[in-house]
Image (cartoon, rainbow, N blue to C red):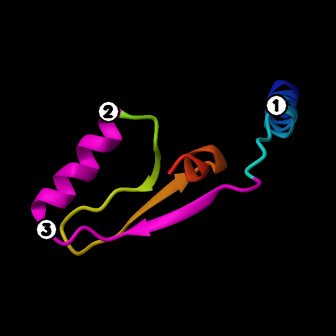
Amino acid sequence: MKNCILLVFGLLALATAAKLNYTGHKVIRVIPETKEQLEFLRDWKSSSEIDFWLLPSSAGRFADIRVSPESIGSS
């Protein structure tokens, strides 16, 4: 039991220390209207470091993509 409590506190300390700053980041929602657009999003996800929070399962379903301030500024 003591080891379990130590493990929980250790994980909490690690999670607290590893906080990231997402200031300036945006979440963009896109909706692919065709199968080609859906495939483009799937290919883009597998070939880049874009952070997809949600990938659509079919055309007409939305995808949420986190974009960094650097990515926004380079467009």
User: Which of marks 1 and 3 precedes in the sequence?
Assistant: 1
Q: Secondary structure at mark 3?
A: loop
Residue at the spot 24% in from the left edge and 61% down from the top edge? 57
- How far apart marks 3 and 1 lie (CA) works out to 43 Å
For disc 1, the neighbor class at 10 Å (few under 14, some 14 to 19, many from 20) is few
Residue at the spot 49% in from the left edge and 65% down from the top edge? 28
Please name the residue that numbered disc 1 is placed on.
14
What type is the residue that disc 3 sits on? Thr
User: Which of marks 1 and 2 precedes in the sequence?
Assistant: 1
* Up-down relation of residue 17 to residue 33 (above or below): above
- How far apart marks 2 and 1 lie (CA) works out to 30 Å
Percent position of residue 51, x then y: 49, 45
Q: Quadrant of residue 19?
A: top right
Of tags 3 and 1, the one toward the viewer is 3
Write down the region rendered in magenta. 23-47
Percent position of residue 69, x then y: 65, 50
* Up-down relation of residue 13 to residue 52 (above or below): above
What type is the residue that disc 1 sits on? Leu
Q: Secondary structure at mark 2?
A: helix
Of tags 2 and 1, the one toward the viewer is 2
* Up-down relation of residue 32 to residue 19 (above or below): below
The reply, left or right, for residue 24 in relation to residue 72 is right
What type is the residue that disc 2 sits on? Ser
Please name the residue that numbered disc 3 is placed on.
34
Give the label on residue 47, or none.
2
Q: Quadrant of residue 29?
A: bottom left
Residue at the spot 85% in from the left edge and 29% down from the top edge? 10
